[in-house]
Image: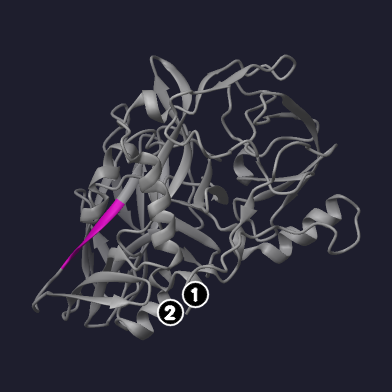
Amino acid sequence: MVAIVYDSNTSVRGLDPFNAIEISGTPAVSGGTPTTSTGTNADASYSLDGYTSVINDIQLDVLQPAEFDNPVFTSMDQAVATVDQSGYVTGVGAGTAKIQIDSGGQLKTYRSLISTSNAYSDYAVTSYTSGWLPEHIETQVFNLLNGETPGDDAGTFWSSNNGDVTSPSATINANLYASSIDFSAMSCMRSGMPDDRFPLALVTNRHALIARHVKPGIGSTIIWKRSDGTYQTAEVEGVYDISDGTDLSVIYLDRAVTGITPFDVMPADWETTYAPSHDTASLQANVDPNITGIPQGGIPIIRKSMHNLSGSWRSFLTVNLFSKSLPSNKTFNFFPQWNSLYDRQGDFDPWSSRGNSGDSGGSMFFIINGSPVFIGSVWTKTGAAAPWLYISEINTAMDTLASAAPGTYTLSAPNLSSFTTT
């Protein structure tokens, strides 16, 4: 089989973060008879599409802004796979191949993994089971959107934001569908930015997390707006980049942020313990050993994206789907647009279409017991570093930046004691 996955060595030149090319792939089944089945797995019901023949081919589809040239496809190893200029990849031999896509100066490299396996299965969640964490999060988001009309009126986060850190003025949209959720631990502006793009997520009263590629520099001014309408100013005193080069940085502030409750972060075992339908090992053991890809459907997340409203960029709270984390590179995937991936989410589709280019570093959240739980900052249009896989390093970094004794600063986790576990 051939599967196209994001390559950690991807190179992007001359890239406008709002106009990145996107690549997706559709397997081409050759021989055999596809099968479809349904079942349950602890926290979810699912559908399973199985294939019993060798699948060596895949069709790459490139979504790109209109101003860019047609993509040029190149296979870096013809003995493993070839590719034509329509993006059709043909498997030739077992091994790992690289497919390069060059589009108007944007160069991306994707790996194609050629497998000799004669079976694989596509797994899709169709519903979650009551009492489990995924069902709770989904219900929380359903309740927020119930009775709301998708669009700028209900989805815009800041209705105004002057971006002036010396005299800040920012107003949350009075009609926001998530107005009952306290997002005040997400910064509203920072020096050098015209609005609230690239926000910091406060995780202690002296530390914040942000995507590494949009981190603020030492001395940058950061503004938070408290729920009572007052503002908190702090400057960046220290920065720690996660050591393996992933897109995550820890920020140390020159003073304590008061009057704001920092965000919780998911615990390291949350998928294996509370959401086995999104854990590959659990799926392979309990559903089908041939499941290797990204689960279709998923847990609703609220993502702070940017949306061009009447010619100006403003924050929009987009509803997307968490798919699963990837422990091998400590990231996670999400679906930026739902496109009716599974039937019960049809009503969410209009909310997901907003701000689909996202904004780099935009904060993402699960809603648990009425509170936002920080799950990451946007890295690519479909992925981010997973902070719950870096808890030990983040805790150590927070103490080091503050010249504090080990254990002085630690990430807080949400209370999950009321949910069913494996």
399 relative to 72, above or below: below
Where disc 1 sits, the SS reads helix
Q: Earlier in the sequence, mark 1 or mark 2?
A: 1
Find out whether residue 27 is within the magenta segment.
yes
Provide residue 66's location: percent of width, then percent of height: 28, 29
Circle 1: is it few (<14), some (14-19), or many (20+) Cα within 10 Å?
A: some
64 relative to 115, above or below: above
* Residue kind at label 1, given as amino acid type: Thr
**Quadrant the N terminus occupies:** bottom left
Between 78 and 398, the residue placed more toward the observer is 398
Question: Where is mark 2, residue-wise?
Answer: 281
* Residue kind at label 2, given as amino acid type: Ala
Question: Where is mark 1, residue-wise?
Answer: 272
Question: Does the rendering let one see residue 230?
Answer: yes
Name the image quarter holding residue 150: top left
- The magenta-colored residue range is 24-28
Q: Which residue is pictured at 67% across the width and 27% down the height?
A: 228
271 relative to 196, above or below: below
In the image: residue 308, left or right of residue 378: left
